[in-house]
Image (spheres, rainbow, N blue to C red):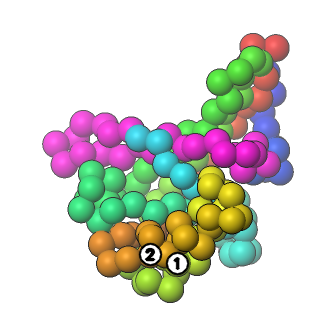
Amino acid sequence: MHQMTDAEWRSFAMTGTRTGKLAVRRKDGRPHVTPVWFVLDGTDPDAPHGVAVVFTTGAEGVKGRALRRDPHFALCVDDQEPPYSFVLLECTAEISEDLGELLTWATELGGRYMGAEQARQFGERNAVPGELLVRGRIDKVTAAAALAA
């Protein structure tokens, strides 16, 4: 096992169509974990770790309500094949309902997970009122590779 460098964990997290497992806290304190499509945004040089994690979610779903109440979340990305690796990002959410930003990022997400030919269609379907754009400021990274090596 070895601890991943910043470059390694960023590359690992963005490989292929790996989903993140998003953990938020329900109103009653119980945890809620669901898979999400995400991308890393490296355009803010002042961001801790040089990147932010970006995803969309419905405003009235469990994730949207939980993040409005408490902006802290964790996102785990893992490789389920030997020798097993993972990245755990502990984040603080900044939430936007700006439809222009939603279109940009939902299109980016669509491109990653559905392919370039469907990216715009996915973006337009998801950049609508009632959707939230979540930018997670990464507060802490835990990243380990080759756990079973």
Q: Amino acid at mark 2?
A: Ala
Residue 51 in magenta stretch:
no
Q: Residue reaching furthest top?
A: 148
Q: Which residues are magenta?
A: 11-33
Q: Nearer the viewer, residue 101 or 136?
A: 101
Distance between the Cα atoms at labels 2 and 1?
A: 5 Å
Q: Nearer the viewer, residue 142 or 130?
A: 130
Task: Identify the secondary structure beneath mark 1.
Answer: helix
Q: Earlier in the sequence, mark 2 or mark 1?
A: 1
Q: Is residue 40 left or right of residue 92?
A: right
Q: Quadrant of residue 31?
A: top left
Q: Is residue 35 visible?
A: yes
User: Label 2: which residue?
Assistant: 127
Q: Which mark is residue 123?
A: none
Task: Identify the secondary structure beneath mark 2.
Answer: loop
Q: Amino acid at mark 1?
A: Leu
Q: Is residue 69 visible?
A: no
Residue 26 in magenta stretch:
yes
Compared with residue 96, is residue 65 higher up or lower down, i.e. above or below? above
Q: Residue at x 49, y 48 (%)?
A: 36
Question: Where is residue 1 shown, x and y percent of the image?
Answer: 79, 21
Question: Where is residue 73 shown, x and y percent of the image?
Answer: 43, 50
Mark 2 and mark 1 residues within 8 Å of each other at the beta carbon: yes
User: Label 1: which residue?
Assistant: 103
